[in-house]
């Protein structure tokens, strides 16, 4: 999807692009507002790149609208620990908020996927709770005020995203490696049999 194409310009600042073995977090060298500006920068870079590629404007709009005027909660909370009076607006993306059902859907999907991925509890009940919380937070923050998302749409999204995320993150059985004997490995017909 093109909505996060701007992350290509500074991929190391986005957790989904970092190697699990990578010890250093580049955000550690920045304060919370600097980190927020880096995150915000992927939107402007993404819009520029999408327009350079001559993508239709309807596609380009997904880039700013999927963040709307939300804010990176992690950095905002950390900044509030240092200064409880810090202005939340300094952390908000410039927007606009979603103006179509489709960009609202991407906003919800993006937030839900990130929250579920970072959660240690991926049971169906917990995933549903996360999905409902993300939607509620966006709704209460006014993110859906400029689009025609209905209550029926929201109920459908809650169920659909929950099912998809539970399926994507359900635990997998670790299968033992099959041991192949020397005679099986040297089958003259090239067939491999499983012991």
Image (cartoon, rainbow, N blue to C red):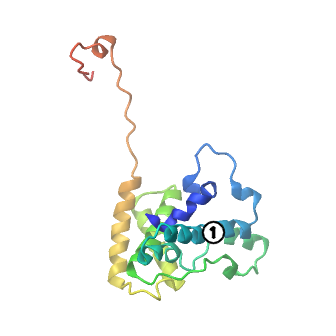
- Work out which quarter of the rendered image holds the C terminus and state it: top left
Location of residue 28 by image quarter: bottom right
Which residue is at 70% across, 59% downward?
A: 27
Location of residue 73 by image quarter: bottom right
Q: Is residue 154 above or below residue 179?
A: below
Location of residue 33 by image quarter: bottom right
Mark 1 secondary-structure assignment: helix
Q: Is residue 90 left or right of residue 123?
A: right
Residue 145: x percent and y percent? 47, 88
Relative depth, front residue between 68 and 128: 68
Residue 159: x percent and y percent? 34, 70
Q: In this view, does 85 lie above or below 54?
A: below
- Work out which quarter of the rendered image holds the N terminus and state it: bottom left
Residue lying furthest top: 183
Q: Is residue 73 left or right of residue 140?
A: right
Residue 46 showing in the rendered view? yes
Which residue is at 43% across, 68% downward?
A: 109
Mark 1 Cα within 10 Å, few/some/many (few <14, many 20+)? some
Q: Disc 1 marks which residue?
A: 41
Residue 187: x percent and y percent? 25, 14
Residue lying furthest right: 82
Which residue is at 63% across, 54% downward?
A: 12
Which residue is at 73% across, 73% downward?
A: 80
Q: In this view, does 192 lie above or below 149?
A: above
Residue 111: x percent and y percent? 49, 68
Task: Count the numbered circles shown.
Answer: 1
Residue 119 showing in the rendered view? no
């Amino acid at each position: 999807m093109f909505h996060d194409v701007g992350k290509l310009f500074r991929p190391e600042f986005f957790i989904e692009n970092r190697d699990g073995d990578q010890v250093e977090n580049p955000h550690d060298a920045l304060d919370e507002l600097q980190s927020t500006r880096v995150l915000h920068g992927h939107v402007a870079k993404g819009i520029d790149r999408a327009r350079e590629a001559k993508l239709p404007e309807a596609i380009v709009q997904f880039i700013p609208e999927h963040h709307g005027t939300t804010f990176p909660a992690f950095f905002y909370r950390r900044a509030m620990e240092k200064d409880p009076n810090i202005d939340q607006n300094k952390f908000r993306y410039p927007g606009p908020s979603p103006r179509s059902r489709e960009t609202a859907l991407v906003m919800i999907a993006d937030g839900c996927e990130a929250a579920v991925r970072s959660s240690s509890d991926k049971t169906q009940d917990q995933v549903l709770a996360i999905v409902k919380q993300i939607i509620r937070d966006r709704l209460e923050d006014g993110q859906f005020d400029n689009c025609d998302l209905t209550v029926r749409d929201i109920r459908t999204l809650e169920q659909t995203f929950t099912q998809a995320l539970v399926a994507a993150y359900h635990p997998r059985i670790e299968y033992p490696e099959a041991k192949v004997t020397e005679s099986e490995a040297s089958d003259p017909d090239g067939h491999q049999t499983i012991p």
